[in-house]
Amino acid sequence: MQTALRSLIALSFVGGLALFLCPKGGPGQILKLLVTAVLISALITPLRDLDYDFLSLEEAKFSSAEAGLLLEAQQRESALKKQLFTQNCERYIEARAEELGVRIRRITVDVVGAGEEDWAPYSVRLEASGSPEAMETLCQLIRDTLGVPAERQVWSADE
């Protein structure tokens, strides 16, 4: 490519010098057409010599890399959505617990996929303390609002 660029520059200088030295009129017009044809030919020649197989291979590599990046981005987006959903469920339980007077030391919500991009709470593990009635009410709230039955709620006493 550098060789083609150097030859194009050299031909431009030679053609410009020839046009400068040539008398105006008929011969100058003919020389202008000739210089233009030579420069266009010098510009097109490297395009004939391109390695189209190599370019196709590089294009395939770029396409493969693009597909990999898109897949990785989708996986990260899904993981972030899952994490956000989990945090929202935990905050909801903490807010309801605070309203009921239940002190939560640790909470973990496990979620499962509920479609392509949706998540649903599956189980809840709580380390909490409070009155038995308030804890029972919180258990029912978790069951009714989040859909986690009591069998998948693991409660342990706050230490």
Image (cartoon, rainbow, N blue to C red):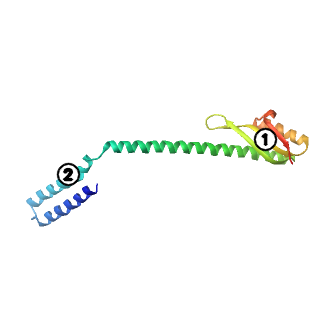
In the rendering, which numbered label is found on residue 125?
A: 1
Mark 2–mark 1 Cα distance, whole angstroms, equals: 77 Å
Q: Residue at x 34, y 44 (%)?
A: 54
What is the x, y in percent for residue 155? 83, 40
Left or right: residue 69 versus residue 62 is right
Q: Looking at the rendering, in which quadrant would you find the N terminus?
A: bottom left
Circle number at residue 41: 2
103 left or right of 14? right
Tell me where residue 42 appears, x and y as whole percent.
Answer: 21, 53
Report which quarter residue 86 is drawn in.
Answer: top right
Left or right of 4 on screen, residue 77: right
Q: Position of residue 137 (x, y in %)?
A: 86, 39
Residue shown at the point (78%, 45%) measured from the top left = 107
**Nearest the eye: 30 or 130:** 130
Q: Which mark is residue 90?
A: none
**Looking at the picture, which amino acid does disc 2 mark?**
Ser
Please tell me which residue lies in front, 88 or 25. Answer: 88
Residue reaching furthest to the bottom? 21
Tell me the element at label 1: strand
Asked if labels 1 and 2 touch by Cβ distance under 8 angstroms, the answer is no
Q: Crowdedness of circle 1 by 10 Å Cα count: few (<14), some, many (20+)? A: some
Q: Depth check: give the residue in front, 22 or 53.
A: 53
**SS for dot 2:** helix
Q: Is residue 11 above or below residue 156?
A: below
In front here: 30 or 71? 71
The correct choice, above or below, for 114 with respect to 20 in the image is above
Q: Amino acid at mark 1?
A: Arg
Residue in the image at 90% along x and 41% along y: 132
Q: Where does the image place residue 59, in percent across and percent down from the top left?
A: 39, 44
